[in-house]
Amino acid sequence: MTIRIYCERCGFIFYRGDELTNPQEIIKKYGGKCPRCYKPLQLNPKNIKIMGVEEGK
């Protein structure tokens, strides 16, 4: 299953892959803000969504 971590405001994809990654590392990598829309990045468990996607779509 492919994992995607993206900006909820503009849709910029921070990470796409098959391995689970640490969201805190992604926040650090991008300096705490989205490079496209400059939205501050925060690790808020209330905003984490896990959704299944049909294969091939």
Image: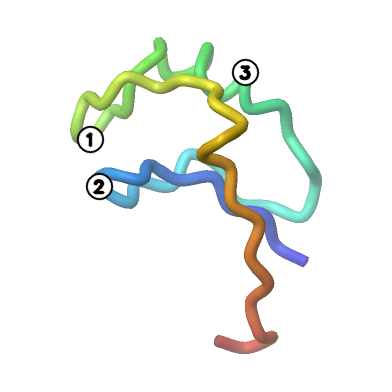
Q: Amino acid at mark 3?
A: Gln
Q: Which residue is mark 3?
A: 24
Q: How would you rate the neighbour count of disc 3 (Cα within 10 Å): few for under 14, some for 14-19, many for 20 or more? A: few
Q: Amino acid at mark 2?
A: Cys
Q: Could you say which is closer to the camera, residue 45 or residue 22?
A: 45
CA gap between label 3 and label 1 equals 19 Å
> In this rendering, is residue 29 above or below 8?
above
Q: Is residue 8 above or below residue 35?
A: below
Disc 2 is placed on an element classified as: loop
Q: Position of residue 33 (x, y in %)?
A: 33, 19
Question: Which callout, 3 or 2, points at the residue further toward the start of the chain?
Answer: 2
**Image-quadrant location for residue 45:** top right
57 lies left or right of 40 = right
- Which label belongs to residue 10? 2
Q: Please report the residue visible at 51 percent of the width from the left and 39 percent of the height from the top.
A: 47
Q: What residue sits 25% from the left and 47% below the top?
A: 10
Residue displayed at 27% across by 44% down: 9
The answer to which image quadrant residue 22 occupies is top right
Residue 25 versus residue 1 in the image, above or below: above
Where disc 3 sits, the SS reads helix
Residue 12 x, y percent position in the rendering: 34, 46
> Does 43 appear above or below 56?
above
| Residue at image mark 1 | 36
Circles 3 and 1, Cβ within 8 Å, touching? The answer is no
| Mark 2 crowdedness (10 Å alpha carbons): few <14, some 14-19, many ≥20 | few
Picture quadrant where residue 21 is located: top right
In percent of width and height, residue 31 lies at: 40, 11
